[in-house]
C-alpha cells in the first residue's frame, strides 16, 4: 500500500523489510522507531512461569503454539517449527484464530506462545493471566520502523510523526538509539 501510495507510512520489522528488499533495489525507506523484545508467554500456573529466562532450544516443542509467519525476530529460526499435528491435537487453528484467542488458550492451559513486548504490556494491564519469560538468546529483540516512499508527498508530516513516536514510544520497548544487549532486554520485564 505504501508502494502504491494508498498510505504514506506503515510499521514494519527491520528483518521483514530486509527480506522484502534483499534482492531488489530498496525503493522504500526504513526509519527506525524502537526496539522490541519478544517473550515466551505461559499461563500463570505453568511450571515455566517463575523461571528468570529461557533459551529458544528449551521451549517445550509439544506445548508451543506458533504462527506460520515470522514476527521479525532472529531467534525465531532457533525455535521449533509450527506443527500442524500438535495444533490439531490441541484443537488450535493458527490460520483462523486471533492472537488474543491463542493467548487466552495459553492462559488456561500448559501451552505457550510468543508475545511481543507491546502486547505483553497490554496483557499485564488487563490481568490476562499470563506470565512473560524473557529469552536469553541473542536475536530476542526486533527493530521496528516506519516504511515510507523516499519522495512521499507528506514527508515532513511523516518525519514529525516518527519523531513523536521516538519521543514517546510504547511501554516495554527500547529506544532506537539504544545499544541492544540481551541483559538489557531482560530488565524490560
Image: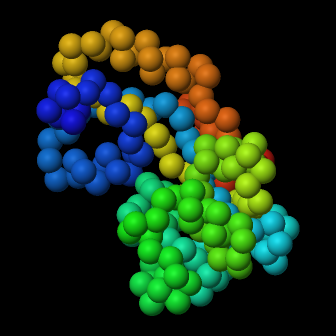
Say how the picture is coloured: rainbow
Query: Horizontal and vertical percent for residue 59?
Result: 64, 78
* Nearer the observer, 187 or 171: 171
Instruction: State the quadrant of the N terminus.
Output: top left
For the point 75% across and 43% down, the residue is: 125
Residue 42 location in percent, x, y? 71, 68
Q: Residue 86 location, x and y as percent?
A: 51, 87
Residue for point 44% across, 74% down: 93
Answer whether residue 168 is visible to the viewer in this image. yes
Q: Is residue 137 visible?
A: no
170 sits left or right of 154 in the view: right
Residue name at image x 58 percent, y 77 percent = 64
Q: Nearer the viewer, residue 141 or 45?
A: 45
Instruction: Count up the numbered dots.
Output: 0
> In this rendering, is residue 117 above or below 111?
above
- How far across and down, in percent of the image, does residue 65 sit? 54, 74
Identify the residue at image location x=61%, y=48%. Answer: 119
46 or 150: nearer the eye? 46
154 lies left or right of 56:
left
Q: Does 41 appear above or below 5?
A: below
Amino acid at each position: 500500500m505504501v508502494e502504491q501510495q494508498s498510505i504514506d507510512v506503515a510499521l514494519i520489522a527491520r528483518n521483514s523489510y530486509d527480506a522484502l528488499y534483499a534482492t531488489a533495489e530498496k525503493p522504500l525507506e526504513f526509519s527506525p522507531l524502537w526496539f522490541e523484545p519478544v517473550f515466551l508467554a505461559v499461563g500463570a500456573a505453568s511450571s515455566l512461569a517463575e523461571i528468570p529466562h529461557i533459551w529458544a532450544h528449551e521451549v517445550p516443542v509439544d506445548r508451543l503454539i506458533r504462527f506460520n509467519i515470522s514476527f521479525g525476530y532472529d531467534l525465531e529460526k532457533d525455535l521449533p517449527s509450527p506443527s500442524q499435528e500438535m495444533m490439531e491435537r490441541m484443537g488450535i487453528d493458527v490460520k483462523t484464530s486471533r492472537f488474543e484467542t491463542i493467548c487466552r488458550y495459553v492462559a488456561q492451559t500448559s501451552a505457550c506462545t510468543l508475545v511481543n513486548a507491546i502486547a505483553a504490556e497490554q496483557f499485564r494491564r488487563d490481568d490476562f493471566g499470563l506470565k512473560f519469560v524473557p529469552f536469553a538468546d541473542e536475536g530476542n529483540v526486533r527493530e521496528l520502523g516506519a516504511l515510507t516512499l523516499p519522495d512521499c508527498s507528506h514527508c515532513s508530516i511523516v518525519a514529525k510523526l516518527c519523531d513523536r513516536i521516538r519521543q514517546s514510544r510504547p511501554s516495554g520497548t527500547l529506544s532506537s538509539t539504544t545499544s541492544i544487549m540481551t541483559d538489557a532486554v531482560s530488565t524490560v520485564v
